[in-house]
Amino acid sequence: MLFIGHFSFDEISPEGDPKHGYFSSIVDAETPDAAVAKFEKHIKRMKTQVREMSAVVNDYIEEILRVPDIPETPIITRLQSSDGAFPPSISHALPGVHNEKIDAFGLAAEVEKHEKTNDGGFVESQPFITFAG
């Protein structure tokens, strides 16, 4: 059975500043306990093998979703809202994944723009959908 885990984490920047973030993970397991054990083992391995997770100091389970059948219509598996403008952040699709069975899709022409600019800043993403106010 498919399980989706949503996690949050604390990390310490190279300058010693506190940071936080979120990630999701999927796994096939027989039971919720087996899924949690697999998630734990994987997160510990990722901490030592993937640069983007090397500064993580605490991980928290936000929720674990059990998906008995893949839905034919899209569902939202996580929605989070924060006060204020969108904070500066960096996002990585499939960090540390080298598997031919999983693909990440995005706008290829935009990939380079989302990396750091020459002045150290980041280019803001363009909306996919904009709703009238």
Image (cartoon, rainbow, N blue to C red):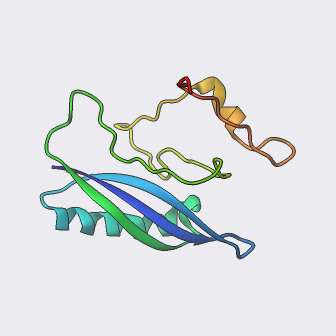
Q: In which quadrant of the rendered view does residue 29 lie?
A: bottom left
Residue furthest toward the right?
Answer: 119
Q: Position of residue 106 (x, y in %)?
A: 53, 29
As displayed, is residue 8 above or below residue 99?
below
Residue at the image position 48 percent from the left and 58 percent from the top = 22
Is residue 1 shown left or right of residue 101? left
- Using the image as rendered, state which of residue 67 and residue 92 is in the foreground: 67
As displayed, is residue 124 above or below residue 89?
above
Is residue 62 shown left or right of residue 34? right
As displayed, is residue 8 above or below residue 119?
below
Residue at the image position 25 percent from the left and 69 percent from the top = 37
Residue furthest toward the front?
Answer: 133
Residue at the image position 40 percent from the left and 66 percent from the top = 43
Assign the C terminus to one quadrant of the image.
Answer: top right
Q: Position of residue 89 (x, y in %)?
A: 64, 52
Q: Position of residue 35 (x, y in %)?
A: 23, 62
Q: Position of residue 2 (x, y in %)?
A: 21, 48
